[in-house]
Image: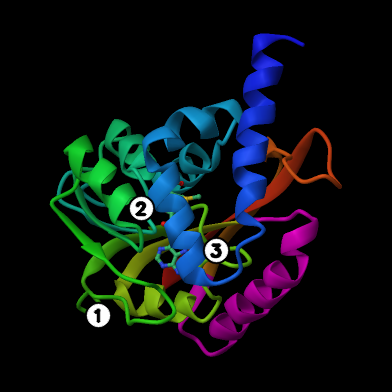
Amino acid sequence: MSAAANTFEHVKAVILSVHKNTSSKDKIDFYNTWAENYDQDVAVLDYRAPSLAAKSISSHFSGDRERAVVLDVACGTGMVAKQLKGLGFGTFVGIDGSESMLELARRSGLYQDLKQCMLGDEPLPVQWGTFDVVVIVGALSVGQVPVKVVRELCKATKPGGHVCMTTRSNLDNVEYKKALDQELKKMEEEGIWSCVEVVNVDNWERAVSEQEDGYISGTVYAYKKL
Ligand SMILES: C[S@@+](CC[C@H](N)C(=O)[O-])C[C@H]1O[C@@H](n2cnc3c(N)ncnc32)[C@H](O)[C@@H]1O
């Protein structure tokens, strides 16, 4: 077996270990232990969601990037802010449930402010209607951030501002994605926001479940608050 295959098997085992845990607190405990190795491990999985989301935001945003205030929800170690910084955005506020992930984000030096919050249990700790861009990457999925939180993401956004979200389309996330799609559509029908684009991506990241091989697919959603 090659060194690369060993590395992939190791990362797969690390991620599969979390499926034994069920509560959201267990999930956050898992991220607390994973934080230091997170960036290098997701590189092994070809995790491209942060760059795909950043490209989507960049292609639809027409304001002053340096002055735009970006709320990075479930910011983790700061991969999304790093991508957006490379595309000219300058001001970031990050939120996450894991203190260890937040510590890595703090060390990145990219964020003006970082706050701990258990999304779904506690309200988003921000003032409504104040962000030019709200982004959530890698966290809207089964066992992580509940679908109902997307309404708070929209409330945090300025009128005319953008909300970018991602989710996975693989087997264990089918029901979650269905509920997410229904909620996003319902909010559009209520006149809260309009859909800018939905991009389905085949090679989202390498599969780690026992039932799947190769790459799983995923989706980037871009909405504009009305
Ligand atoms: C896969 S990581 C994604 C991090 C970053 N957005 C990225 O793309 O690299 C998921 C993040 O969501 C956070 N998270 C998961 N469920 C959460 C919840 N209910 N409340 C707050 N944070 C949560 C985890 O702590 C973790 O940092």
Of mark 1 and mark 3, the one earlier in the sequence is 1
Of 85 and 107, nearer the camera is 107
Task: Estimate how packed mark 2 is, as few (under 14), some (14 to 19) or many (20 or more) residues with alpha carbons within 10 Å.
Answer: many
Q: Which residues are magenta?
A: 168-194
Horizontal and vertical percent position of residue 109: 16, 38
- Which residue is drawn at the image coordinates 58% and 57% (left, top)? 197
Q: Amino acid at mark 2?
A: Cys
Mark 3: secondary structure: loop
Q: Is residue 18 visible?
A: yes
Is 187 a magenta residue? yes
Residue at the extreme bottom? 190
Of mark 2 and mark 1, the one earlier in the sequence is 2
Per the rendering, the mark at residue 128 is: 1
Query: Where is mark 3, residue-wise?
Result: 140
Give above or below for 154 relative to 59. below
Mark 1: secondary structure: loop
